[in-house]
Image (tube, grey):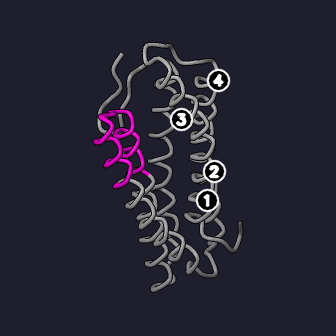
């Protein structure tokens, strides 16, 4: 991780965590399709807890990397890959959100629309990666990568907390606070 941007590392791990989370979403979709009154399955609860712990682990790894980067005055060699990846991700997330909302409206599914709103977090994280990568690429100031990592830490902790709240049975939406 010495020569790579901390924000790109964090963004990559976040994408992996979102893949784990998708397993729980698939299970939830089948549950809602069959009978929306059914309780969450043990698998769905486990997937939410794994997702929550994974987000907390990501936040810890990014914080440790930021501290080490500050102490050792580390900086990435380049952030060009972060610029490219985040640009593709922003466009992809925008398109995915638009399509999910369209499908959600057509099917009258609040769950699909809420999931589309949750994808906004991924898009925000992509913007953080893009901004920190561009700022570093044009200035060479390593602190921009660390500031970008701080933004990813904030979102990771928020997403981890939400995953645990959902596992505990609280109704959470990406726009609302969790309700008991």
Residue labelled with disc 4:
43
Given residues 163 and 1, the one toward you in this image is 163
Cα–Cα gap, marks 1 and 3? 20 Å
Over which residues does the magenta segment extend? 98-121
Cα–Cα gap, marks 1 and 4? 25 Å
- Which mark lies nearer to you, 2 or 3? 3
Reply above or below: 14 against 160: below
Report if the CB atoms under discs 2 and 4 are less than 8 Å apart: no
Residue labelled with disc 2:
16
Cα–Cα gap, marks 2 and 4? 18 Å
- Disc 2: CA contacts within 10 A as few (<14), some (14-19) or many (>=20): some
Residue labelled with disc 1:
12
Q: Earlier in the sequence, mark 1 or mark 3?
A: 1
Q: Earlier in the sequence, mark 2 or mark 4?
A: 2
Report if the CB atoms under discs 1 and 2 are less than 8 Å apart: yes
The image quarter containing residue 79 is bottom right
Q: Earlier in the sequence, mark 1 or mark 4?
A: 1
Residue labelled with disc 3:
25
Q: Earlier in the sequence, mark 3 or mark 4?
A: 3
Place of residue 112 in the rendered image (x, y in percent of width and height, measured from the top left): 39, 38
Q: Earlier in the sequence, mark 2 or mark 3?
A: 2
Q: Residue at x 61, y 37 (%)?
A: 23
Relative to 14, 88 lies left or right: left
Given residues 26 and 164, the one toward you in this image is 26
């Amino acid at each position: 991780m010495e020569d790579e941007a901390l924000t790109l590392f964090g963004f990559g791990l976040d994408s992996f965590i979102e893949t784990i989370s998708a397993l729980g979403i698939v299970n939830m979709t089948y549950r809602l399709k069959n009978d929306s009154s059914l309780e969450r399955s043990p698998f769905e609860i486990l997937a939410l807890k794994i997702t929550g712990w994974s987000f907390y682990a990501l936040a810890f790894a990014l914080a440790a990397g930021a501290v080490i980067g500050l102490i050792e005055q580390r900086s990435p060699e380049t952030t060009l890959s972060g610029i490219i990846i985040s640009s593709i991700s922003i466009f992809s997330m925008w398109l995915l959100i638009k399509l999910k909302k369209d499908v959600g409206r057509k099917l009258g599914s609040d769950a699909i629309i809420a999931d589309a709103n949750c994808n906004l977090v991924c898009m925000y994280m992509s913007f953080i990666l893009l901004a920190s990568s561009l700022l570093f690429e044009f200035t060479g100031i390593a602190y921009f990568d660390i500031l970008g990592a701080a933004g990813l830490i904030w979102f990771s902790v928020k997403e981890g907390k939400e995953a645990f709240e959902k596992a505990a049975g609280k109704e959470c939406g990406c726009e609302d606070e969790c309700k008991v």
